[in-house]
Image (cartoon, rainbow, N blue to C red):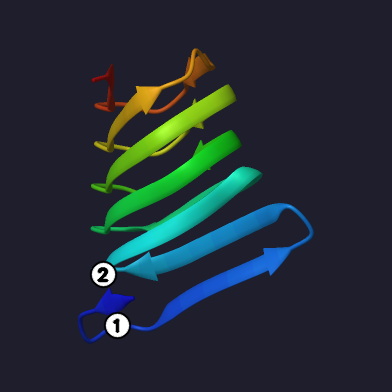
Amino acid sequence: MTTGESTTASIQIGDMLTYGSIGTTATLDCADGKSLNVAGSDNTLTVNGTCETVTVGGANNKIAFDRIDERLVVVGLDNTVTYKNGDPTIDNLGAGNRINKE
């Protein structure tokens, strides 16, 4: 589910889900152990299920996760990432990113 006037690309290959868009609001599902790669900017995403690994690029994304198990890598700028459950290794390689466990 997406809203907005921009083009959205969401592709799944095996257990890797890739989401790339600009200015959208969407709900994604990692189901039970998929990995997620987020690119693009100014997105508001809610991610259900259990993500094994997550990579966030782009800028000004706001992403809320149910659970991240293994690794969270944030390489973009000014992203806000929150997660409720899990104990991932966190690599904050960008600038101005906010990462919090709720």
Whether residues under marks 1 and 2 lie with C-beta atoms below 8 angstroms apart, the answer is: yes
Q: Which element type, helix, strand or loop, lies under badge 2? A: loop
Mark 1, residue position: 6
Instruction: Kindly report the distance in space between the C-alpha atoms of the residues bearing marks 1 and 2.
Output: 7 Å
Dot 1, how many residues are within 10 Å of its Cα: few (below 14), some (14-19), or many (20+)?
Answer: few
Where does the image place residue 95, in percent across and percent down from the top left? 32, 26
Q: Which element type, helix, strand or loop, lies under badge 1? A: loop
Residue occupying image coordinates x 67% and y 66%: 12
Q: Is residue 14 above or below residue 83?
A: below
Sequence order check: which comes first, mark 1 or mark 2? 1
Q: Is residue 62 above or below residue 23?
A: above
Q: Which mark is residue 24?
A: 2
Residue 59 visible in the picture: yes
> Quarter holding the C terminus?
top left
The amino acid at mark 2 is: Thr
Residue occupying image coordinates x 26% and y 69%: 24
Residue occupying image coordinates x 28% and y 38%: 79
33 relative position to 55: left or right: right
Where does the image place residue 64, in percent across and percent down from the top left? 29, 40
Q: Which mark is residue 80?
A: none
Where does the image place residue 62, in percent across and percent down from the top left? 24, 45
Q: Quadrant of residue 80?
A: top left
